[in-house]
Amino acid sequence: MPELLRWHARLGGAGVRATRKRVLVLEALLAEARPITARQVHAELLQRGEPIGLTTVYRAMSSLVDAGLVHAFNQDGEATYRVCGPARHHHLICRACGLVLEQAAERRPDGFEVEAVYGVCAACVRPALSEQDFDAPRDQPGRPRKRNAGADERD
Amino acid sequence: MPELLRWHARLGGAGVRATRKRVLVLEALLAEARPITARQVHAELLQRGEPIGLTTVYRAMSSLVDAGLVHAFNQDGEATYRVCGPARHHHLICRACGLVLEQAAERRPDGFEVEAVYGVCAACVRPALSEQDFDAPRDQPGRPRKRNAGADERD
DNA sequence: TTACAGCTTGACAATGGTTTTCGTTTTCTA
DNA sequence: TAGAAAACGAAAACCATTGTCAAGCTGTAA
């Protein structure tokens, strides 16, 4: 598995020990195209028969983020994580479908240095439009979470 | 106070009763240029001698957001709120100083409809640069919150 | 291999922002 | 006013995340 080895090297290069648990967490993240939560990673590893504590998952995430191998996002107040490349970049995050696109680093003409752009991707814009016709304000990315929301409620 | 009356009208227009408490919350938000938390609003109203429950502040925020008078953001996992105009727009939010800029609605060439842009404003970029020289990845906006952080730690 | 220091792990408790519950109060409409 | 519906507040519940601490693991010098 050469890819995992490469990640291993990146871990070491960032001064983070490539322990078994951290590699497991990394594997779980690599298996997902979209950002997932610490709890999801935890559940997935348990399901795979890999015993790991939720605390450990959170700590592994923290190390991976510090090492620059993983980016953390915030969806409905819950942190989600996704592996990402070493080049300087920022993300476009679709609030509707969770899609994340990496974009080359960007500084706007006004000097604002972009780190993350939240919004609705092209594929999701159309249905949303027909629903409320571009007028009523939509939910903000930082909208307080809905605790009782089902698996993944869509507004 | 004609301004407050205008907000009153916007409330009514959105089908939200302009109750005394909601207007108090709105006033508190109007007094702040930057987004503030529900707890801050609560504390400020109590200090002004206006008895109000924290629950009520949260509920008022929710109504105001639904009515489109207020936008909600997420800073370090805590929801912050800010009044905003009726025109379609999105926000530039500086992760470092909390500054929020309203920008005209924007749809990128790739069809992505922008709702919020997190990053570092021009004024904050320079000091950050001298510190870590543009290489190491910085914190993401959605970075899991630090619960024990002081008033407002900056990394 | 052994010893040891330091890092990592996991169970559990604590934290703190937000939501729910439920009884009371206020507001709106007739 | 009266009655209905919405709003309110205190307290409890919820839940993602972090802190604590003892036990296990890893790297390294001897």
Image (cartoon, coloured by chain):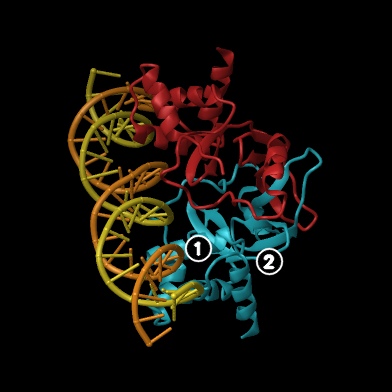
Chain colours: A cyan, B red, C orange, D yellow
Position in image of residue B56 (x %, y %):
37, 33
Q: In this view, does A89 lie to the left or right of B11?
A: right
What subunit carries mark 2?
Answer: A
Q: Determine which quarter of the picture holds residue A103.
A: bottom right
What subunit carries mark 1?
Answer: A
Q: Is residue A47 above or below residue A15?
A: below
Amino acid of disc 1: Met
The answer for how far apart the CA atoms under marks 1 and 2 are is 16 Å
Residue that carries the numbered disc 2 in the rendered image: A85
Q: Is residue A88 above or below residue A4?
A: above
Q: How crowded is mark 2: few (under 14 residues within 10 Å), some or many (20 or more)?
A: few
Q: Is residue B64 left or right of residue C13?
A: right
Amino acid of disc 2: Gly
Position in image of residue B121 (x %, y %):
70, 38
Position in image of residue C28 (x %, y %):
40, 26
Residue that carries the numbered disc 1 in the rendered image: A61
Residue at 47% x, 43% y is B78
Q: Is residue A34 left or right of residue A60?
A: right
Residue at 50% x, 36% y is B152
Q: Which of C16 and B115 is in front in this view?
A: C16
Q: How crowded is mark 1: few (under 14 residues within 10 Å), some or many (20 or more)?
A: many
